Image (tube, rainbow, N blue to C red):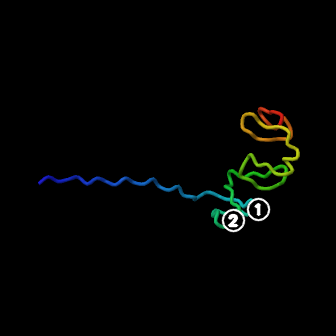
Amino acid sequence: MATKKKTSAKKSPAKKSAAGKKYVCATCGAVTTSKGHLCTPVVMDKAAKCDYCGMIVGNPRHVCKPKAMKMSFYCDACGRTAAKQSELCMPKKI
């Protein structure tokens, strides 16, 4: 009688743990390691404060009302908007 080798089942890739990630609430500015406790969580590494409205945002292309009122140029390379040509690497007039 021939013996059969058992084939091992494929291992599923390990889930990335959220350990070490910090989140900041875009509404109130609270910081925690669990995004479930925040109203509008943003990963701390990607969070920035908007120069125009002061809001904490995770999107570098954030356009708020004060910025939209002054917006005159956009970057032909990345699409960012700005009030001055000097704030962009490849400015184009809107």
Q: Quarter-wise, where is residue 87 in the image?
A: top right
Tell me the residue at 54%/58% (across/down): 17
Give the percent coordinates (x, y) of residue 21. 62, 57
Q: Residue at x 80, y 33 (%)?
A: 91
Apparent side of residue 1 relative to residue 35 in the rendered image (left or right)? left
- The residue shown at (34%, 55%) is 9
Q: Depth check: 74 or 20 in front?
A: 74
* Mark closest to the chain's N terminus, 2 or 1: 1
Left or right position of 3 against 80: left
For residue 82, which quarter of the picture? top right
- Give how far across and how far down residue 85 sits, in percent: 84, 35
Disc number placed over residue 27 in the picture, else none = 1
Q: Is residue 80 above or below residue 31?
A: above
Residue occupied by mark 2: 38
User: Which of the 4 quarters of the picture holds residue 8?
Assistant: bottom left
Quarter of the image with the C terminus is top right
Mark 2, Cα crowd under 10 Å, few <14 / some 14-19 / many 20+, is some
Identify the residue at the far bottom of this view: 37
What's under tag 1, amino acid-wise? Thr
Please tell me whether mark 2 sits on a helix, a strand or a loop.
Answer: loop
